[in-house]
Image (cartoon, grey):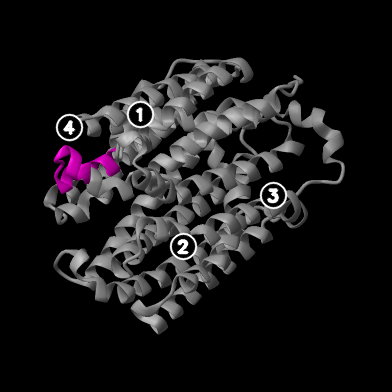
């Protein structure tokens, strides 16, 4: 069966990228506004932490289900529902006068982002022929990474600018025009798509996956703040049997010819399984690095939020450049070796940062904090863009949403584990007390975390050997075989069905 490429796919891509960057910025934009939110709403420190963590938790719990909903009921429909809900939730956050309303708005924001974000990659996967996906994933990886890294800088500019005297509120209200434009343009430009044989949602699978991930992610994100009470350990232990039951249930649904929430046979594809392993390590490295880095710059070195955001510019710009070169030039020619080189280069950057932090201490200058981010940005750029393409490369179109949701969930889980490791290393080195009073010890505490980040990249280098050597490479005649690519959907689906 031949699938005609969507003639409006490039215009639709712009809409998808706007939605992706809205989510990416919202993950980190709140951090710099925390003191202002506390002063204005009277929120306690615990409530403000939940304003940050509530979004991430709701987002992580809903990604797999959100992806599968797109497969079953229409990716465009679910995407637009997510955009509309995310925009309304942003309005609630922007006009909130109490911490309770703000927290509720953030949780709803995260849940609606979990509907919106998985559709981005799945729509790309089913709308673009194989010969164009490399370019698209390169742009997607660069834009989303830029959004995450630019979040603190955008937040600082909006808060310091005090637009219309609204203080911190524009960090949420800026989503309104973007969301409205995205909603209208998306309705006009995005082509609807869904699995050829739409089935009912696996409700039991949704419940099991949500509970299992809740038991796993909630203690990881809140355990340190609460001093690791007994319930956190009980939940972590309980997550194992719950997720095991989820896997068994998915096998049973597939065995009966139904549509499981997660198609487990996708893990038999080396590009998918190995790619998710690298994605987990990539998220872990990010979780370890970015929390301690932000505290080091602002509390340890006394940088303003704006100055701290500017110090990350080399990372943002070189990550974008590395992503573009990786997808357009290097990976199509050299395959997985490009990602492995990226992992090694990023590890070198962490080693350089550890040395410079230890050597210069609190006297380190702005440009010296930027220098180690050059190899880290290049290395991460070589990994982040082609990784999504490799993970989805062997996924049948009917499972694109589910696979995209699982890809995003893996990243979120890695970041949660990384944040815990960062807390254990960074805060344990600082000892008891408020980190704000321990600025003198922060450079050394930060230096202690960097070898772990470097180690995560080195392990990713090793895990990449599980990915096929030719992953991401394009044959010389690939451009002439578009029809073969377009008929892959039914063939791949048949392969999975017969494998059962």
N-term mark: 3 or 4: 4
In the rendered image, the vertical position of residue 429 relative to residue 378, given as above or below: below
CA gap between label 2 and label 1 equals: 28 Å
N-term mark: 4 or 1: 1
Query: Under tag 4, what secondary structure?
Result: loop
CA gap between label 4 and label 2 equals: 33 Å
385 drawn magenta: no
Measured from the top left, where is residue 426 in percent x and y? 29, 67
Q: Residue at x 76, y 38 (%)?
A: 131
In the rendered image, the vertical position of residue 410 relative to residue 422, given as above or below: above
Residue at the disc numbered 3: 327
Mark 3 vs mark 4, foreground winner is 4
42 drawn magenta: yes
Question: In the figure, residue 208 lies in which quadrant?
Answer: top left
Circles 4 and 1, Cβ within 8 Å, touching? The answer is no
Query: Under tag 1, what secondary structure?
Result: helix
CA gap between label 1 and label 3 equals: 33 Å
Between 39 and 422, which is closer to the camera in this rendering?
A: 39
Residue at the disc numbered 2: 311
**In this picture, which residue range is highlighted in magenta?**
37-54
Q: Which mark is residue 318?
A: none
Q: Residue at x 52, y 66 (%)?
A: 373
Query: Under tag 3, what secondary structure?
Result: helix
N-term mark: 1 or 3: 1
Measured from the top left, where is residue 371 in percent x and y? 53, 71
Residue at the disc numbered 4: 98
CA gap between label 4 and label 1 equals: 15 Å
N-term mark: 3 or 2: 2
Mark 1 vs mark 3, foreground winner is 1
Q: Locate the C terminus and report the quarter of the image it occupies.
A: top right
The residue carrying pointer 3 sits among few (fewer than 14), some (14 to 19) or many (20 or more) residues within 10 Å by Cα, namely: many
Q: Can see residue 114?
A: no
């Amino acid at each position: 069966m031949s699938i005609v490429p969507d003639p409006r796919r490039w215009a639709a891509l712009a809409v998808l990228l706007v939605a992706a960057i809205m989510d990416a910025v919202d993950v980190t934009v709140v951090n710099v506004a925390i003191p202002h939110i506390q002063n204005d709403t009277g929120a306690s420190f615990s409530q403000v932490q939940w304003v940050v963590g509530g979004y991430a938790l709701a987002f992580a719990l809903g990604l797999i289900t959100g992806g599968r909903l797109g497969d079953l009921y229409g990716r465009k429909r679910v995407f637009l529902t997510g955009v509309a809900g995310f925009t309304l939730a942003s309005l609630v956050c922007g006009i909130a006068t109490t911490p309770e309303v703000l927290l509720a708005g953030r949780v709803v924001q995260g849940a609606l982002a979990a509907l919106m974000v998985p559709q981005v990659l799945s729509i790309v996967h089913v709308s673009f022929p194989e010969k164009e996906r490399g370019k698209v994933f390169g742009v997607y990886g660069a834009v989303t990474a830029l959004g995450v890294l630019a979040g603190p800088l955008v937040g600082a500019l909006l808060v310091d600018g005090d637009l219309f005297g609204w203080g911190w509120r524009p960090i949420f209200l800026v989503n309104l025009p973007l969301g409205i434009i995205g909603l209208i343009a998306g309705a006009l430009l995005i082509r609807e798509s869904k699995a050829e044989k739409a089935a009912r949602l696996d409700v039991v699978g949704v419940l099991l996956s949500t509970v299992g991930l809740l038991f796993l992610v909630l203690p990881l994100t809140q355990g340190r703040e609460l001093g690791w009470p007994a319930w956190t350990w009980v939940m972590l232990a309980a997550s194992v049997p719950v997720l095991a039951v989820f896997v068994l249930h998915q096998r049973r649904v597939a065995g009966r010819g139904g549509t499981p929430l997660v198609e487990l046979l996708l893990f038999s594809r080396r590009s998918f399984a190995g790619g998710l392993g690298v994605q987990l390590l990539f998220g872990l490295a990010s979780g370890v690095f970015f929390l301690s880095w932000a505290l080091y710059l602002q509390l340890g070195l006394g940088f303003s939020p704006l100055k701290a955001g500017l110090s990350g510019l080399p990372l943002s710009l070189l990550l974008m450049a590395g992503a573009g070169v990786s997808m357009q030039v290097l990976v199509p020619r050299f395959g997985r070796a490009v990602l492995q080189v990226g992992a090694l280069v990023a590890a070198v950057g962490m080693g350089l940062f550890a040395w410079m932090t230890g050597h210069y201490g609190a006297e380190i200058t702005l440009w010296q904090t930027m220098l180690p981010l050059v190899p880290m940005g290049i290395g991460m750029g070589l990994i982040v863009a082609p990784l999504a393409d490799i993970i989805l490369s062997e996924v049948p179109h009917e499972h694109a949403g589910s696979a995209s949701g699982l890809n995003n969930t893996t990243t979120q889980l890695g970041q949660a584990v990384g944040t815990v490791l960062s807390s254990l290393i960074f805060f344990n080195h600082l000892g008891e007390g408020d980190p704000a009073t321990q600025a003198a010890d922060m450079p050394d505490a930060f230096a202690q975390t960097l070898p772990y980040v470097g180690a995560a990249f080195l392990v990713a280098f090793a895990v990449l050997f599980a990915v096929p050597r030719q992953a991401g490479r394009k044959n010389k005649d690939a451009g002439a075989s578009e029809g073969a690519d377009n008929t892959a959907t039914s063939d791949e689906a048949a392969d999975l069905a017969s494998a059962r």
